[in-house]
Image (spheres, rainbow, N blue to C red):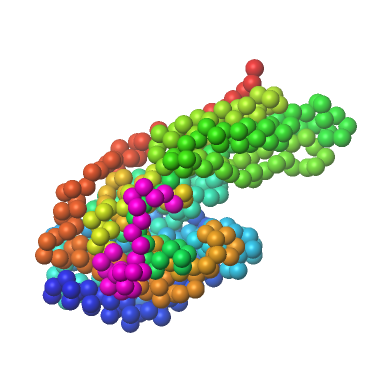
């Protein structure tokens, strides 16, 4: 069977499972779990894979899932990826009232997409010899939140890296993968499909200001106020804005997770979780140095200590141009060329994804489907069109995979031969290990 016929068969299979796929995504929406907490979500996905009759590994990087479908002939291996985790967004319409977990980014739709592609590939591989393999993956912890919790898992030895794809790479779960695809939801005004551009990389900060408690009313002078130190540090950080170049898309931001324990006691410990984002590793390194100086300045001004832990975050994404072209052709067939947007290479979304890490190691695409209203990561981010959110992306990705593997010109093989790899998996792991640093600054 030729690639065009195989693609048509995939789309028919996905259409026939449309309600099943949408209901899966809506179930996950109603039962959100943040990164490395997705045990119920992972078990739910595992049951759906059992319904498809597909063996799979569970518990990779605590909650991740992986399985393989062999096409029957030698060829490249392509991964289809979905992400299990939610954010925490208090007040979201679908937030868990106890944990504030909410799918305010659309990851619940990715699982439906992944299962749709997987179901289609399984069926066509029964009756046709496909030159390659499909690896299906449900990965944890793409949203780099709950930093203290994740660093605790790291200290306990349960994980080394603190995002799903990073840990999958370290564990060898991508060793047999040559190329990878996934899609993400976006707002409706961004087109029914869009692809291209890049994203920010980042490093992650876990910071503790350590002072001395005393009676806040009777003897504040006997204490050392860690909260005041943190305020000086954050004000100093704000003064750095004019030192940052616009083209580097630097973002310096964070949250205070502990500001003290009692209003009547001078705060002796204050915790801050922050992020240094940027479009290049060089820009991130420069901004990270500036943040560290500001944190130390706050400690110096008040006379407390500050402990600065820098955790290895993400790298900027590179969408493979040849894979992107194939995806665009498939997406245009489904929704019309005028509904598919190709972003300029230099366009930077400002956000970050660990798909960026993968893109430095192998060819990937990370397109978007425009289906939501509201603000990304906000309380009003809601997906409205589930056919376009789940079914059409599954079809576009399935068609892309079929073209990559089965077209007579063997595009996957050419893409791999032309790919300029920045890191091997081994060198990537070594590089990320070197980015984890811990420093305690004690003013003299």
Residue extending farthest to the left is: 408
Where is residue 209 shown, x and y percent of the image? 65, 33
Residue 251 vs 54, above or below: the answer is above
Residue 327 vs 316, above or below: the answer is below
Q: Residue at x 64, y 21 (%)?
A: 443
> Does the image show residue 111?
no
Which residue is more in the foreground, 36 or 413?
Answer: 413
Quadrant where the C terminus is found in the figure = top right
Where is residue 323 shown, x and y percent of the image? 25, 58
Quadrant where the N terminus is found in the figure = bottom left
Residue 404 vs 234, above or below: the answer is below
Q: Image quadrant of residue 312?
A: top left
Q: Residue at x 44, y 74 (%)?
A: 386
Which span is picked out in magenta?
328-349
Q: Is residue 219 left or right of residue 66?
A: right
Where is residue 390 shown, x and y percent of the image? 40, 71
Q: Image quadrant of residue 371?
A: bottom left
Where is residue 147 shown, x and y percent of the image? 54, 45
Residue extending farthest to the top is: 444
């Amino acid at each position: 069977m030729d690639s065009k016929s195989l693609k048509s068969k995939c789309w028919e299979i996905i259409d026939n499972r449309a309600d099943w796929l949408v209901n899966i995504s809506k179930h996950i929406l109603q039962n959100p779990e943040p990164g490395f907490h997705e045990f119920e979500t992972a078990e739910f996905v595992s049951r759906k894979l059992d319904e498809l009759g597909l063996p799979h590994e569970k518990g990779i990087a605590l909650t991740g899932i992986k399985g393989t479908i062999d096409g029957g002939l030698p060829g490249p291996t392509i991964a289809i990826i979905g992400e299990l985790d939610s954010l925490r967004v208090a007040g979201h319409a679908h937030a868990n009232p106890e944990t504030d977990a909410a799918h305010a980014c659309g990851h619940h739709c990715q699982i439906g997409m992944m299962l749709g592609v997987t179901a289609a590939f399984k069926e066509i591989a029964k009756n046709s010899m496909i030159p390659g393999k499909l690896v299906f993956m449900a990965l944890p912890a793409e949203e780099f939140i709950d930093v203290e919790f994740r660093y605790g898992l790291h200290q306990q030895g349960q994980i080394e890296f603190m995002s799903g794809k990073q840990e999958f790479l370290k564990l060898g779960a991508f060793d047999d993968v040559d190329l990878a695809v996934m899609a993400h939801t976006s707002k409706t005004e961004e087109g029914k499909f869009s692809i291209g551009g890049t994203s920010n990389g980042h490093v992650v900060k876990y910071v503790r200001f350590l002072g001395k408690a005393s009676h806040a009313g009777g003897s504040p002078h006997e204490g050392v106020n860690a909260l005041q130190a943190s305020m000086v540090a954050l004000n100093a950080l704000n003064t750095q804005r004019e030192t940052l170049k616009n083209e580097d898309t630097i973002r310096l931001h964070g949250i205070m997770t502990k500001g003290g324990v009692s209003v009547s006691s001078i705060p002796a410990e204050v915790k801050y979780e922050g992020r240094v984002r940027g479009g290049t590793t060089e820009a991130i390194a420069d901004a990270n140095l500036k943040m560290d100086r500001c944190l130390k300045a706050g400690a110096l001004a008040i006379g407390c200590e500050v402990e600065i832990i820098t955790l290895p975050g993400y790298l900027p994404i590179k969408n493979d141009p040849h894979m992107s072209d194939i995806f665009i052709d498939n997406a245009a067939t489904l929704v019309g060329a005028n509904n598919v947007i190709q972003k300029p290479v230099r366009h930077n979304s400002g956000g970050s994804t660990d798909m960026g890490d993968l893109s430095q190691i192998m060819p990937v695409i990370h397109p978007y489907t425009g289906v939501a209203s509201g603000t990304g990561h906000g309380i009003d981010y809601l997906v409205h069109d589930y056919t376009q959110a789940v079914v059409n992306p599954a079809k576009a990705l399935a068609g892309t995979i079929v073209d990559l593997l089965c077209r007579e010109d063997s595009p996957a093989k050419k893409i791999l031969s032309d790919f300029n790899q920045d890191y091997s998996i081994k060198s990537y792991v070594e590089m990320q290990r070197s980015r984890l640093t811990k420093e305690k600054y004690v003013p003299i």
